[in-house]
Amino acid sequence: MPAVILQLRKVTVDKRTYSEVNKDILRLMTKTGPGYYAALGIVASLAGILFFLPWAYQIYRGQGVTGLNVPVLWGVYLVNFVFWVGIAHAGTLISAMLFITKTPWRRAIARGAETMTLFALILVALYIFIHMGRPWNAYWTMPYPNQRELWLNFMSPIMFDVFAIGTYTTSSAVFLYFGMIPDLASLQHQTTGWRKKLYSTLSLGWRGTDAQWTVHGRATMFFSSFIMPLVVSVHSIVSWDFALSLVPGYSQTVFAPYFVTGALLSGLAGVMLMFTIMRWAYPFLTKYVTDYHYDRVGALILALSLVWSYFTCMEVFTGLYANTSLELEHLKFKILTLPYFKLYFLMIFCNSILPLSLIFKKLRVSRPFMLFLCIFVLIGMWLERYLIVPNALSRKFLPFMWHDYTPSWVEVSITLGALMFFVSLFMVSIKLFPVISLFEVKEDIGIPMKHEHRKDGA
Amino acid sequence: MSGNPIKAIIERLKEFRRPGYYKNYDHKWTMVIDLDRCNGCEACVTACYAENNLPVVGKEDCGNSRVMNWIRVERYVAGEYPDVKVKFIPILCQQCSKAPCELGCPVYATYHNQDGLNVQVYNRCVGTFTCATYCPYDVRRFNWFTYKWDAPLEQQLNPDVTVREMGVMEKCTFCIQRIRAGKDKAKDEGRAVKDGDITPACAQSCPAGAFTFGDLNDPESRVSMLAKSRRRFRLFEELNTEPSVIYLKKVFADGGGNPPVGGHTLAGGHPPVKEGHGG
Amino acid sequence: MKRRDFLKYIGVGGAGGVLGFIFGKVSKPPVGKLMPYLIPDPDIIPGVANWYASLCAHCGAGCGVLVKVMEGRVKKIEGNPEHPVNKGKLCALGQALPQTLYNPDRLKKPLKRTGERGRGQFAEISWEEAVSTVAKNLVDLNKSGNANKAYLLTHPLRGTFAKLAAAFMSSLGTSNIYEYELFQNRNLLYALETSMGLDCIPRYDIENTKYLLSFGADFTSTWVSPVLYSDAYGKMRQAAPGNRGKLVQVEPRMSLTGASADEWVAARPGAECVLALSIAYALVEKGYYRGGEVDAWRSALSKYKPSAAAHIADVPEKRIYEIARDFAKTRPSLAIGGETVSSYQDGVSGLTAVNILNHLAGNNGIKGGVIANAAGEKPDFKKGIAALIDDAAKGRVKTLIINNTNPVFTTPDGAKTVEALKAVGFIVSLASFKDETVALADIVLPLDACLEDWGDDEPNPSVGYPCRTLMQPAVSRAADTLGAGDVFLAVARAVGGKTAGRLKAASYADYLKDAWRDEYAKNKRMSAGTLTFDDFWNASLKKGGWWHPVGETKKAMRVSPSAARDAASKGPSMFEGDAKDFPFYFMLYPHHVHRDGRGANIPWMQELSDPMTSVVWGNWIEINPKTAERLGIREGALVTIESPFGKVSAPAYLYPGIRPDTAAMPIGQGHDAYGRYAQGKGQNPIRILPFKNDLRTGAFAVNSTRVKISPAAREGGIVKLEGTANEAGRDIAQTVSVSEYMKMKKEAV
Ligand SMILES: Nc1nc2c(c(=O)[nH]1)N[C@H]1C(S)=C(S)[C@@H](COP(=O)(O)OP(=O)(O)OC[C@H]3O[C@@H](n4cnc5c(=O)[nH]c(N)nc54)[C@H](O)[C@@H]3O)O[C@H]1N2
Ligand SMILES: Nc1nc2c(c(=O)[nH]1)N[C@H]1C(S)=C(S)[C@@H](COP(=O)(O)OP(=O)(O)OC[C@H]3O[C@@H](n4cnc5c(=O)[nH]c(N)nc54)[C@H](O)[C@@H]3O)O[C@H]1N2
Ligand code: SF4
Ligand code: SF4
Ligand code: SF4
Ligand code: SF4
Ligand code: SF4
């Protein structure tokens, strides 16, 4: 066990034992009541009805079933794409960035955040396909050798996206899996039947030797360093889809950090929302995800909200400063025209004003308040993307072509259905894999006495 | 270059970075549009429909701004009764030398050919909309559905031009099929393409003779002459897209020139009568 | 001729051979899709286009076209670069010829009425049955001594077909040929004849003029010969370096042409005549007029001193003098009068006033002014549509042959056209589409599209020298149709007797060729030189007709002061309806591509945005934004337009280019029949007009009533392509002022 970890401040309630941790997580994974099945059934069928069926309809009829038009060719699908990339940022932030900065409270929530990242990225990939006019040709955006010597345009920000998202998904998956190996090894001893088979296969012969732990520790450090730049780069690249264009409202130098900040903000809100709901469903989780987490994440959300607010001001300010018809019309449309006027100020309320309340520790540790706040921040962040992506296109260069955009029922349905799909994936995954990292939580408890250790059988 | 292949490649690549690199190619197709001649009749629009198999989308999709016109005549109005000033400007793909659409396309479905044209490869397009989003001139059109021609209207479809399928982007090609035919014919006759050999459908139809098409690399061509006009301008020149469509300014009788920022007021009172300015 | 153009003119021989024009041997379209490739016609080389020179019949301008044919199908229409009317250019409606040819709603077989008249119920019959039914009716009529109760109502005819129709009718013993079309130049021809002594529409030399004063002539869009004049307009603006003709447009509602004008003079509706005469007075008063009879002119025009006219026409006195000064001093100048003016109840006066202006300014017979043409076709002014409807209503019409004109759509409810037609014993309709008039017929004979038919034309206005255009089939017939000429010949054969004797030709193609043989024999007009007839004929087929510049037609064009007195005696034109109850002048104008309604069945034309409003697939009413604000009408809101004669509704378009006391609507939409693309697109505004016809010319006046406008609660369903017409200060369509432009000495144009 690396010495550094031993010196970390203990953040979880220390009264628990290793066996209790094992039992708790195992119970979560194996004891499944009818409530869970009912919930999963509803969510999964909603995903089918709201997401897969309309998508099939869209593929059959064409993109015309959306509300897209010329010039608003990027609509809700791209908004969702950007939004879910943002959600995916929490995993990397908590697992890698906070690991490297040696922030102790990350351990209990890291696994959950990483899982969320992976599933969010699955949605991101799906949205790329959903957004395409000819999704059956999606593989053409991959560099593969072919006789016609067709190659990709590496100048295209869309191509950057393909690589950024590809890299991010791969490394997130590896990181998640790698971090889970000691837990899987421990679970194989506590389970029987198919689970035992599954976990023993997946644990790749992990035995918990010192040598293995040393390698694991180093590798975690390496992966964290490797993945950390992605926190900044992925959403910067996503922002370049817009910033590298000439479109007023897109062509903003401030976009890269603005998008990254927004991503982290929504990602953290997403994680806390998820844990709050899980704590409600599985009250024993309160032992692991404690007030301390709420306090720390709340503070981080506050900090990110302040930075975000600054960028939002700058975005308006540079437009005003430019003082051209292009920039001013865009701002006028986005901020002063109904219904966007209402949406804009709802966004400001959600992302700037409401998070200011997190100054108060009482509110930071209040679960109902955090639930409420996280939902609002997520709505606000979705609105931010909505007010950028289709809105800027409504007021492009040639006034004769100005046209508004309203999402069609297909787009609305797919948006909600995809959320349901995400939730279904998550619900299934908590039954298959430990959503709380066993070994990291145990690190919190510290090295027990030898006999205790044996009794535990770990 | 002393036989260093890397250096040779770099030199070659540098050529592309030099502004106006297309001068090294055989042609630089250019359209000059005289706004002082254009009267807004839209014969050009219909000619393009006929030549390029543009589908009719119907009332509802027209309302959704999904009309498939590759060229449109934009009309801007300033002033209030009785001092109303109207301006027409036909807008087609500007065939930008530095085309923002090309930057956006991940799969090179839209790219620059050696005649300085921004070409669109329908087969390659996967429909990401990026090109159209990046295009400052909103000239790209998307096949939202599989468009149908009520039988027997499909019999008029021009076999020289593809009928595009659902999910791909399309736009004005400068009537590349006519350019192709003109070049082939010149080649068959063992000569170079002459000025006037090639005329896109819109240019050919225009009753007012507002369009002139030709090769800017040919210093003797009519477009080269017109491009020197002091009335010349290009659309959103400041975006540095270097369009291949050159407009000639409309002459306005009021002495007011361009409308001030904010539009609307152009002329106050009746325009002053200029004795014999017509002659 | 350019070599590359010459190559396009591949002879028609082969294709002509496969076309059976003799009645009963109508050639079928190529079997299926595959057969033409397996057993190709000798003319068909897959992938290689044949070009046929022909004539556009979408309007009366008579433009020459080249038809691109590949694999036996028409692919594209282009202007014939050799043709002196359109010089290789085409208008939007001309481009749409293939969509008439391949229109899914074309009549494909002869029809016989089965239901009650007007219910539109028909059964398909054979050509034999159709023709014998018609012939039997005509023979019976003749036997009963009612030969003079057979009538022909047709669109205005020119060329050989006009002769055929006249021969046919006279052989039956009747001279009842009525020509009708909504915008027919009746008033123009009448004014030219009575005040200038002209038997033609002259060449208005817009191309070379330096100052064009247009009274409501939408010449770049719909007036008389749009392509001819658009070409001239382009040249007037920017042909010679440094020279740029000025356009002043006088009209209450800014037309497409008005939009391009340097100055728009929004005179009061109906008062253009007064304005023109006051300008004429100013010319005399200020001594700009250099001709004789100065005092007679002064006294003839004295009622129209600018000081008085300014009030009537709502144009400042100062401006009238300025226009007079510019019109006189800018050499050459030219005045023209168009649809707006000629569509008033007293349309002739306004057009006469225009002739007076040209006379006083010395514009007649000079380059850049008014140049005479050879005599052209002219309607019988006594035989207006009102006379025909009157005859029909009174039961004087036993048999009516209607050839390709749609009076039910283009006359108002008040004309009671439907009732009158119902009183007709037997109606034969020759048409390509089942329009509102066809719905009333007993027998419907489906016509070829012009791309399938033979024909010829002498354009009017002509081009300053003799010009004859040939129409030839570019493809074989798509359905079981016949050309109008062949229909008449077939009926003549079936009627037998004197009629068959007069019209012996086996097909209209033969008849046409014989007619050209006569022309050739005269040789004077055609200037065929040493060519044999066969060479001449083949050359004409290749070229698309025959024309030869042989010097200008010299004709005296004088206007006398008494003409002025005639024109002046009327004052401003009348509008029905009390100004208090009906506060708005109601102006109707031909839609730029639907024209009088004929273009509404073409999908391209429906989807082509109106250039001034950008509206597609529908109708609208233009209201000044200030007026709309006052009435609480928002853009796109449905409004009810009520005249003393009826009401229609349409969505509002807020149009800054219209007088606040005027409302305007395009004609063309509001069909109840006429195919899937035309039907149910708004309401037809003609319906609510009074049926006012000029007693001298028989022309139906569409600008003749006042209306009131009231907002309806509903959204009007207007679809327009524009986001906004406001340039937002972005300097998109850039301009240069005249003074700057004049400084551009070295302009390389
Ligand atoms: N997306 C993107 N990001 C970039 C770059 C890029 O190319 N794209 N380039 C990088 C580089 S090299 C640089 S130097 C920075 C530049 O970064 P910025 O200085 O932010 O450059 P811009 O975005 O070009 O311009 C900012 C605003 O100035 C307005 N503006 C233009 N002219 C004037 C003027 O005359 N007066 C006023 N008041 N405003 C005006 C523009 O409309 C725009 O809204 O960006 C860096 N970041
Ligand atoms: N119209 C217009 N012109 C402008 C500006 C503007 O706003 N509008 N902005 C101005 C400003 S602020 C700037 S900074 C300049 C930027 O002008 P440039 O410096 O020309 O910037 P780029 O066009 O981005 O080109 C940089 C080149 O460097 C290459 N490159 C990238 N990385 C490396 C590397 O590691 N090594 C080497 N050797 N090459 C590399 C890239 O492929 C690219 O070809 O443009 C200026 N010009
Ligand atoms: S055809 Fe010519 S005149 Fe007509 S709108 Fe087009 S460019 Fe203008
Ligand atoms: S829509 Fe087609 S052409 Fe445009 S960027 Fe996407 S793949 Fe390229
Ligand atoms: S006008 Fe638009 S589509 Fe055409 S080359 Fe330029 S950016 Fe591309
Ligand atoms: S150049 Fe050809 S493709 Fe382009 S607008 Fe004109 S007709 Fe259409
Ligand atoms: S003006 Fe247009 S519709 Fe009329 S004949 Fe000429 S091309 Fe045909």
Image (tube, coloured by chain):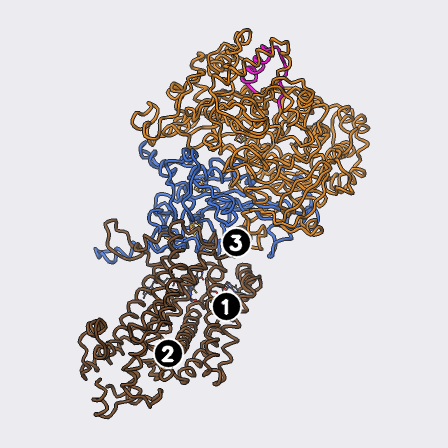
Chain colours: A brown, B blue, C orange
| Subunit under mark 1 | A
Query: x, y (%) of residue C210?
Result: 63, 35
Quarter of the figure with the N terminus of chain C: top left
Against C697, residue A296 (above or below) is: below
Q: Which mark is residue A282?
A: 2
Residue at the spot of label 1: A315
Is A377 covered by the magenta stretch?
no
Identify the image quadrant of residue C694. Answer: top right
Q: Is residue C361 visible?
A: no
Q: Are marks 1 and 2 on the same chain?
A: yes
> In the picture provided, is A241 more to the left or to the right than A213?
right
What span is in magenta? C158-179
| Alpha carbons under labels 3 and 2: distance apart | 49 Å
Q: Are marks 1 and 3 on the same chain?
A: yes
Identify the image quadrant of residue C185. Answer: top right
Amino acid type of the residue tagged 1 in the rendering: Glu
Which one is earlier in the sequence, the residue at label 3 or at label 2?
2
